[in-house]
Image (spheres, rainbow, N blue to C red):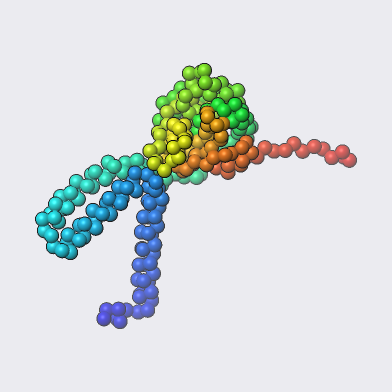
Amino acid sequence: MVWLTLSPWVIFTNIFSAIIDIFVISFIFYSLYRICAQTKAVQILQGLFVFVLLYVIARILKLETFSWILDKLANAAVVVLFVLFQPELRRILIKIGQSEWMGKIIKKDPKKLNEILLAVENFHLLSVGALIVFERNVGLKNYIESGQSINGEISARLLMTIFYDKTALHDGAVIIKNDQIAAAACYLPVSDNNAIDPKYGTRHRAAIGLTEETDAIAVVVSEETGKISMAIDGKLYSNYDKESLRKELNKYLGYEPEEEEVLPDENE
């Protein structure tokens, strides 16, 4: 009867607000699901759903003892969930805190990218294992500090020297920051995603693991096959060549195209 006394505009506003409310909540849950997809969090969420379902059934059937047990478990479950979901919660906060404008302040030199691509092409031809990480908006200070500080100019020769299997720095990742080689032999978090193809080794899992937790981009060259792969947002893409990799890195890292030299007109 209350609805009959309300004006059409108020009714429309209430319905519109309810629709927006449902849309926002649905979007949040969908975003959380996408972030947690293909990780151990999915199994935990499934178990949580079963727990809630049992709780609802116990309340409907008025199973007092069972409901009391579930109440006690629910109190402890809140703390347990925070512990279990710690990696996923950290990833969500990182995603929320990412800002595009920070990465656009520093203009990147395309000549440095050419040096990296030249090194990657040589790794591909010689089947030399390599892992090169590009820092974007999320800082990688902790991972940089885990390796050997270099802070040197990017060059194909230096990268090839680092990843030569007789050197002490070849095992680990090189991190590129502000168009410099910040560090080498860096330790990265290895992904525990069960959906990753078993054929991929530690290098590929480390590339995926880092890009699950940060917005970095990782380029991997397989030591066994020489294949070039790129990891971004926790996903691995393979079978790149030099030019296709250049396009991807230009797209995500914002390297400016090199300016072509303009020759004077012969008629002038």
Q: At 42% from the left edge and 28% from the top edge, which residue is drawn?
A: 187
Quadrant containing the N terminus is bottom left
| Res 266 quadrant in image | top right
Along the line of sight, the residue nearer the viewer: 235 or 227: 227
Q: At 44% from the left edge and 44% from the top edge, which residue is drawn?
A: 98
The answer to whether residue 6 is above or below residue 216 is below
- Which x, y percent locates residue 67? 14, 56
- In this rendering, position of residue 64 left or right of residue 235: left
- In this rendering, position of residue 83 left or right of residue 88: left
Residue 35 visible in the picture: yes
Quadrant containing the C terminus is top right
Along the line of sight, the residue nearer the viewer: 20 or 204: 204
The answer to whether residue 104 is above or below residue 178 is below
- Which x, y percent locates residue 157? 60, 23
- Which x, y percent locates residue 105? 54, 39
Q: At 41% from the left edge and 50% from the top edge, which residue is drawn?
A: 34
Q: At 84% from the left edge and 40% from the top edge, which residue is drawn?
A: 265
- In this rendering, position of residue 91 left or right of residue 217: left
Along the line of sight, the residue nearer the viewer: 16 or 53: 53
The answer to whether residue 232 is above or below residue 48 is above
Tag count: 0
Residue 145 visible in the picture: no
Residue lying at the far right of the rendered structure: 267
- Which x, y percent locates residue 179? 56, 31
